Image (spheres, rainbow, N blue to C red):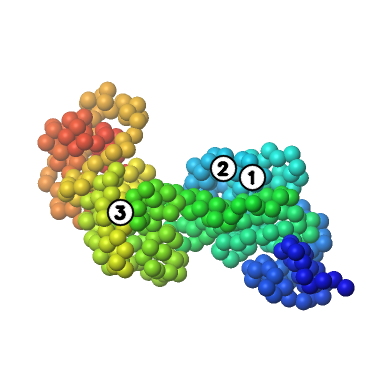
Amino acid sequence: MQSLFFSTQADRIALARQRYFEEGELPSGIVSEAVFQSWARCLRLKQDPRAQLEFQPVTASRAQLALQKNRLLRDAWLADAGELDAVLGATHCGAMLTDPSGVLIGATSSRRVHEKITPVAHRIGVNFAEEAVGTTAPGIVARTGKQASVQGAEHFSECVNFMHCAAAPIRDIHGNLAGVLDMSSEGIAFNFDAASVVGMYASSIENRLLVSQSVEHLIVRFQITPAMLDTPLAGLMGVDMQGRIVWRNAAASRLLGLAPDGEQNGFCKVDELLQSSFSDLASVRGDKHSMLRLPNGLLVHVRCELQARDGYRQVFALGMSAQEALAVDTEAPPEDVYADYAQSPKRAQDDAAASPAVELPEPASLRDADVDLIARTLKECGGNVSAAARKLRVSRGLIYRRTQGT
């Protein structure tokens, strides 16, 4: 007779697994609800836990489509992949990124000689959805949108019962699941809090994705200490030109004491949620921070920047008017990109002459104010783009982009 008492959690999971698949006894209190529900879904799909599992990629066209559709997500992943690979270098762990459906679109290098499954599984296009490989951490996250861990025998298929994985979701500006970050170890159990590590890097990738997806949004960063403003723990929100908060990350929701953004309906005005107007937030310098008292009484440090349509960030300067602030471009593009304009005064004058010479109507938005200020400065400088750029303290390229309406 088998004993109900075991010295390790792995032994208890193995017994619960055997009794559930062979006798139908529920593994209550032994495995998490997420794992149990995944087991049940796999059984409903007529999957066999004893069957040999093959990590097969989807079709080449679907894999290519996944890479193309998730370009911004992959860019955000690549910005952290090198650091993540270095962090995990001596831990016997690897990391991978999947799209919302579970198709792998990125992975760190595999260089551990004892690994047999990881080099095969961590290939672009391999499908980690429950329907394809049974219960895994990335499969559960792709199905539920919630962070999950699957240890050893918690995997549905017996042939991968020596794998250990932890995964976390990555969301987009609409609050939808954009991808899944997974950390896994083959044959060696985690000896650190893998859920916390994968959650932190998922937040970092998510924050990069949110900013890259924002078009003409005021990006508001806030936290209780200024040192955290450029970390994955920073609260982020995107505010449109009408002063509406169109997205916020999980850290921002926690600081504000609100439900996650994905559970909210409609847009909220920034002055209602933060009790601070758009113009007040727009006056915060990009390389410094300001203090803001949240409605719940929490005092936080705040920094803001405008994410422009062309990808360049216009950083607001303290004490400047809205029109002047919009013209500041502290991240000017390389000079050689616009060298032909500097070397062709006639072309620059022609560009300026193409703008209206009559008085412009009162601008209806901050972006209109931006164009209005540039047009008036060009007129004052006789159409000389270089002189106008020096007067406004911006790049010539920015002036050219604005006069072309981009």
**What residue would you read off at disc 1?**
91
Q: Do the CB atoms of the residues marked 2 and 3 lie less than 8 Å apart? A: no
Residue visible at 28% across and 45% down?
A: 288
Horizontal arrangement in the rendering, residue 230 relative to residue 376 (left or right): right
Which badge, 2 or 3, is on the more N-terminal residue? 2
Q: Residue extending furthest top?
A: 343
Residue visible at 82% across and 60% down?
A: 51
Residue 314 visible in the displayed image:
no
| Image quarter (top left, top right, bottom left or bottom right) of the C terminus | top left
Which mark identifies residue 87?
Answer: 2
Q: Rounded to the nearest whole Å, what is the CA distance between mark 2 and mark 3?
A: 29 Å
**What residue would you read off at disc 3?**
302
Label 3 sits on what residue type?
A: Val
Dividing the picture into quadrants, the one containing residue 130 is bottom right
Label 2 sits on what residue type?
A: Val
What x and y, as percent, mark residue 97? Answer: 59, 50
376, 288: nearer the viewer: 288
Residue visible at 26% across and 52% down?
A: 290
Label 1 sits on what residue type?
A: Thr
Q: Do the CB atoms of the residues marked 2 and 1 lie less than 8 Å apart? A: yes
What x and y, as percent, mark residue 63? Answer: 63, 48
